[in-house]
Amino acid sequence: MPVASSARVHPTAVISAQSHVGEDCEIGAYSVLDGRVRLGAGCVVRPHAVLVGPLEMGESNMVYSGAVLGEFPQHLKFSGEETRTVIGKNNIFRENVTVHRGTNERFETRIGDDNFFMAGSHVAHDCIIGNKCILANGALLGGHCQVEDSVFLSGNSAVHQYCRVGRLVLLSGVSSTTKDIPPFIIQQHINHVCGINVVGMRRAGIPAAGIDAVRRAYAIIYRGDLGLPNALKAAENELGDVDVVAEMIAFIRTAGRGINLTHLPQQTRNAA
């Protein structure tokens, strides 16, 4: 059992002989590292957490009590293939978070850096998550979802399997999507778009000119009557030289599940 000499392991923890615990890690009481689990330096595993390999975690991850990372996928066709979970650094997994491994040898579940998974959130098999995302309490990702950087999935929200969620998207509480969500969009209820994430864009350092350009592109694509192909051409002709608008348009053109175009009226948003 390769456990670094500086690691602090509670005597009741169960650590597989195949696991590797890096320098300055802390393994809490009654926690389990099952199979090929590799922890980078400075990781903390709180009591009663379960980590199942093949699982690779980078430095300084924090795993709270009751979290289960790397377990078999909830997929009826999974038959024990050699799949894995790969997690970056500086992530927080709060109580009872679940992250499932990939479904076959061609796929894996992958999580980047600096993400915050609040209590009870779920990352299904084969998902790919970028950096600096937040999944609030009870947020759910179906299998094969792709979540780009700095996305905020609010409490008890849900993303359908195979959906892609663009950078700096905000999915409101108790809302869900069955289609892809382009960058910078706010979505509420089921498949209803209601604006752009101005606050998130400002916090990400996007200049005012870029935010104004996305506002204008949003009006063309979502509020006009050109139809999506013509609206994309119009937005590109007028604003295609602005990087954030180009990012938005490119995402929409490659949206495998399509996008939601139903715009939520202002009075409905105010009542929600």
Image (cartoon, rainbow, N blue to C red):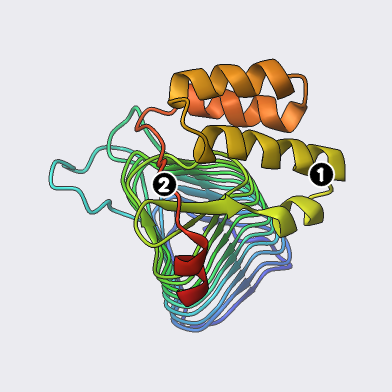
- Residue at the limit of the structure toward the front, as seen here: 225
Q: Position of residue 187 (x, y in %)?
A: 48, 55
Q: Is residue 245 left or right of residue 207?
A: left
Give whichever of 221, 15 is nearer the camera.
221
Task: For residue 146, say whether it is visible.
Answer: yes
**Residue positioned 32% across, 46% down in the render:** 178
**Residue positioned 52% across, 35% down in the render:** 224
State which tag comes first along the sequence, 1 or 2: 2
Q: Position of residue 47 (x, y in %)?
A: 50, 82
Rendered position, 183 above or below 240: below
Q: Secondary structure at mark 2?
A: loop
The picture quadrant where one finds residue 17 is bottom left
- For the residues labelled 1 and 2, say whether their Cβ atoms are less than 8 Å apart: no
For the residue carrying disc 2, how many other residues have a C-alpha within 10 Å: few (<14), some (14-19), or many (20+)? many
The residue under label 2 is which amino acid type? Pro
**Residue positioned 73% across, 59% down in the render:** 199
**Residue positioned 80% across, 38% down in the render:** 210
The residue under label 1 is which amino acid type? Ile
Rendered position, 257 above or below 85: above
Give whichever of 238, 257 is nearer the camera.
238
User: Can you say which quadrant of the picture contains the C terminus?
Assistant: bottom left
Q: Position of residue 126 (x, y in %)?
A: 37, 41
Q: How many marks?
A: 2
Q: Which mark is in front, 1 or 2?
A: 1
CA gap, disc 1 and disc 2: 38 Å
In the rendered structure, find residue 206 and report the number of the disc placed on it.
Answer: 1
Q: Secondary structure at mark 1?
A: loop
- Residue at the limit of the structure toward the left, as seen here: 76
Q: Position of residue 38 (x, y in %)?
A: 54, 52
For the residue carrying disc 1, how many other residues have a C-alpha within 10 Å: few (<14), some (14-19), or many (20+)? few
For disc 2, the marked residue is 54
